[in-house]
Amino acid sequence: MEKAVEKEREIQKEREMAVAAVKGCEKPEELGPLLWRVIELYAGEPFFTSKQLPFTYTVKGRELFCDRREKSITEATFARAYEKIQAAEAAGDPIKGPKKLCMFGTPYIWGILKGTGLA
């Protein structure tokens, strides 16, 4: 049991470091891969949409498959969503929910970004 607890601590530390790397990223060309690493590390964890619908997801390559949806959400879509959130915040008009993202899969993108502390 102690090994399981230690393993969970390691995973949590790796997640925190990955989130910090995204938040501290200053090079746009590095953002996508850093953000996708966060997505990979949280695969299988429970998240909630803004309407409090629970979901989990799996990652296959550069695509995310949500258990509530058939179509995948790509790495590029997550990067665009995160960039849009950052730009809105910098402009003084922070995005407070998925509707303002205006892209495919926003309830899930928002739920994941919010749940990981990136939104």
Image (cartoon, rainbow, N blue to C red):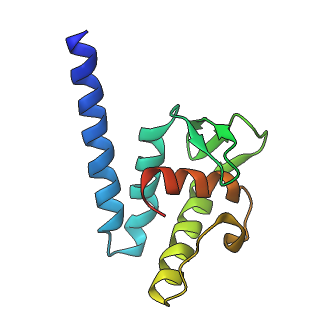
**Name of the residue lying farthest toward the top:** 1
**Please, is residue 70 above or below residue 104 in the view?**
above
Residue in the picture at 29% in, 48% down: 16
Residue 18 falls left or right of residue 64: left
**Name of the residue lying farthest toward the right:** 70
Q: How many marks?
A: 0
Tell me residue 71's x, y (percent): 77, 44
Residue in the picture at 67% in, 64% down: 98
Tell me residue 90's x, y (percent): 45, 86
**Please, is residue 60 above or below residue 76 in the view?**
above
Residue in the picture at 70% in, 42% down: 53
**Please, is residue 73 above or below residue 102 in the view?**
above
Tell me residue 82's x, y (percent): 52, 67
Q: Quadrant of residue 9?
A: top left
Residue 89 falls left or right of residue 3: right
**Please, is residue 59 above or below residue 23 in the view?**
above
Front residue of this view, candidates 111 and 44:
111
Tell me residue 23's x, y (percent): 34, 66
Residue in the picture at 58% in, 75% down: 95
Front residue of this view, candidates 24 and 107:
107
Position of the N terminus, as image quadrant, is: top left
**Name of the residue lying farthest toward the front:** 52
